[in-house]
Image (cartoon, grey):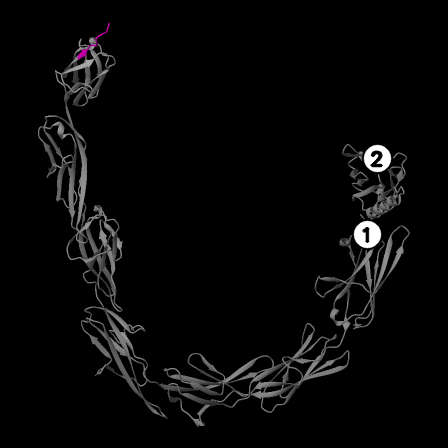
Amino acid sequence: MQNWKFHLSLFALCFIQGVSCQSIVLTPTKAYADINEALTLTCTYIGYNNIAGTKWNINNESTPTIVRHQNGICSGSDIFANDNIYRVGCPSNTSFTVTILRVQQRDLNIPWMCFGHTKISNTVRILAKVPVENVVLSGPSSSYIKEHSRQTIKCKTSPGRPQPRVGWYLHESYTVVKQKITVNSSTQILSDSGDGLIAVENTLQFYPNRSINNWMLSCEAWTDDETRAVYSNRLTLNVAYPPEKPVIMGFTDGEKYSLIESEFVKLSCSSHGGNPLANLTWNCYNSKPTSMTIEDKTVSSTVTWSGFRGQSSCLCISHHSWSGTTQDTTVIIDVLYPPNKPTMTISNKTVSNVINVILSKTVQVKCESKSNPRSNYTWTGPADLSQVEQILDVTINSTIDKMFKCNATNRMVRQNGTHVIGRNESAVTIKVLYPPGNPYFKYEYSNGTKVSTQNMIDVIEGDSFLVHCNAAGNPLPTYKWGSNKGNSILKITSITSDTNKTCHVKNIMEETVGENRTVSTSASFFIRVLHAPYIPTITISNGTRQLNITAVTIQLRETDNINMTCFSEGKPLPNYTWDSHNDQIQGRLRQFTNISRKDAGNYTCYASNLMKRTFGDTEQGLNVSSLSLDIMYPSTISSLEDISTLEGSDLKVICRVQEGNPTEDSVSWTRISDDKNWKNSQLIITNVSRADDTKYTCTLRSTIIPTIGDETLTLRNKTIHLNVFFSSEIKHFTVVKKKSSGTFIVNQTDEVSLECTAEANPASILSIYNTRGKSISTVKNRNLLLYSISNASFENAGKYKCEGRNNYTKDKPSVSELIMVVKCKLNRL
């Protein structure tokens, strides 16, 4: 990769300067390989063109072998085609490779070259690798090497190819761990045997210290693969150095050693390091030293003796033969003893183990004891009291008698790390006098359930029970209820109403030393008497009026807005439920908007409460009131239709009524044409005539009188038409504008109009016949027929007839006749 970078840089420089810069390089320039090891040679063209292949010359053969890249295939010719020996590659258009799959002896030291684009590469020879066979380490001949002195060590390798490399290593004693040394001061000598093999002699100079004492030094050598390095012999570094100053375990030089009197004690002295190790001796009062022990790099010796007061010191001495030095360490001896039993005083007066004190008073008690070292004092008592003071300063703020202990302790510490706690203690009991507290109450029994802090008891009307008054005090208090003397028990029998009760308590406190004090107090509690709901009262309101209900049945007008409210007294306050039509509604109020007849029925109000005794069972209270709603609404007229009948017949029409509530209604008929009245529901006309053909009205009167609200009169009307059928009857047959009747005289050439009028239901079929009995005009479904003669002549004179009929005309139609006379004009000659 480095060769590539160099040649590419060179090519870029040549190209920039405008010089044709081309070359071909065969790498690696020095090829090393083991027998049967694969080796790849790369021929690289450096220039501005691509090449299709390269020629290779092996051992100066006259005919080169070719590696080419053509049509995407990389191939070799001649011997390169044998893929059991060679493998060719074309990594790029300017780079071609040949890999010898297994290097043989015949491949060694023969020249290789490659050609491309008229350029010839450098020559490369394959050289066989020769590994290092042995490495020899040589150093000082003395068994000790002096700390911080200059030391010279040599490492010499056997010849190898490529040039051997050397590494120095330290080995920690008794482990397989080695540390590579970074060499700052060394020299190296190379020797060539003339066959291309090189031997190396590397010299290391260093200054040892005690940290590497007993470590081993070695060197390693290799050619191209450090993992195949050859190890030298190992040199043990025996570094001579003096020991540290001796140490008595747990002490510094001149430190005081505290002993517990009469206790056997042991001291251990050690001297660490040094090569060789030191010897130890003791100089202690009445001591018995043990023989020395050696562990790792430490020499130890132990001495045992019994401590007595007045003993002064103990020495440990070390002797080092190599350096001729002597060192010692001293400890000062001090005898310790635990505290005596403490004594306690109040105001410099010794006190016994019981003290009487009134609550809230403060008392000071001093505790004293002899010891070495001086004692520490701790007072302990109730509620985890722990007071590290010699004087107990305590305010009595609890009614419970208290015992306090004074603990005198000292800590007798041996300098070897162990210690003994010396301790002793004395106790004092404070008997507390205190006034009666606020009385409290218990139900039924003196050890029964306590009444709540609100001092209220819920009972049910008629209950009987006991209440005990209790108050803590020392001495025990006396009791009375109200103004009556007695004991602590209050008896209640068949209670009926709420009441308040007061208990008075008192005691007299006499201190052992000090004042006498009398204290009184009292407390009250309230008895609340619960009862079931009374019979509920029901109130009905329509928005303008309100009525308390006493009747069983209530009449209400349909479409009114009605509120029904239920109320009852109870303790606690009742809950309400309305029950009707298998439907329940919670709450006092039952509302009806536009009340209707479907709301009629029975309604029951349930007033209930849950009476929970403070002590005892819970009972449910229940009471009910019921009423029936009668919904009033007016009657209505059933369907009425127009009527047709034949003249001369009898008529009967009934105005039928759909009954309301109540059913007491009045019905009448009125004829509109003449206000004739029928005073009942039946319209009766005998021998109906055509004059009866008109309109008739049925009137229904309904009166509602509700329990709440005003009386209401409701009028309902329905009108029908009576249609009377009769046969056709000619009423008039005449000449228009002629006043005569029967016979009519007209002038010749006059315009004459005949008019025929009939009365009939249904309308008539009218026909006019001339003098010859021929019909000259006919109309249907009409009661008027007009016929005109535009120019009267004598031919029009004669008898004319008008005939009328309809569905009710029987065999003979109605007929009327007239005679028309035509008066002729005289002609002048």
Quarter of the image for the C terminus: give it.
Answer: top left
Judge by depth and name the residue closer to the eye, 298 or 85: 85
Q: Is residue 424 left or right of residue 614?
A: right
Q: State the image quarter where residue 149 is shown.
A: bottom right
Q: Is residue 627 left or right of residue 188?
A: left
Badge 2 amino acid: Ile
> Which residues are the magenta region?
821-829
Q: Which residue is mark 2?
A: 66
Instruction: Judge whether 112 appears above or below 541 on screen.
Output: above
Residue 764 is one of the magenta-drawn residues: no
Q: Are marks 1 and 2 in contact (CB under 8 Å)?
A: no
**Residue 120 visible in the snapshot:** yes
Q: Position of residue 676 (x, y in %)?
A: 12, 36
Q: State the image quarter where residue 463 is shown.
A: bottom left
Q: Is residue 473 left or right of residue 556?
A: right
Residue at the spot x=67%, y=80% of the render? Answer: 247
Badge 1 amino acid: Pro
Q: Secondary structure at mark 2?
A: strand
The residue carrying pointer 2 sits among few (fewer than 14), some (14 to 19) or many (20 or more) residues within 10 Å by Cα, namely many
Instruction: Judge whether 481 appears above or below 31 on screen.
Output: below
Residue at the spot x=71%, y=80% of the render? Answer: 245
Q: Which residue is mark 1?
A: 131
Judge by depth and name the residue closer to the eye, 567 or 350: 567
**Residue 813 visible in the snapshot:** no
Q: Position of residue 443 (x, y in %)?
A: 26, 73
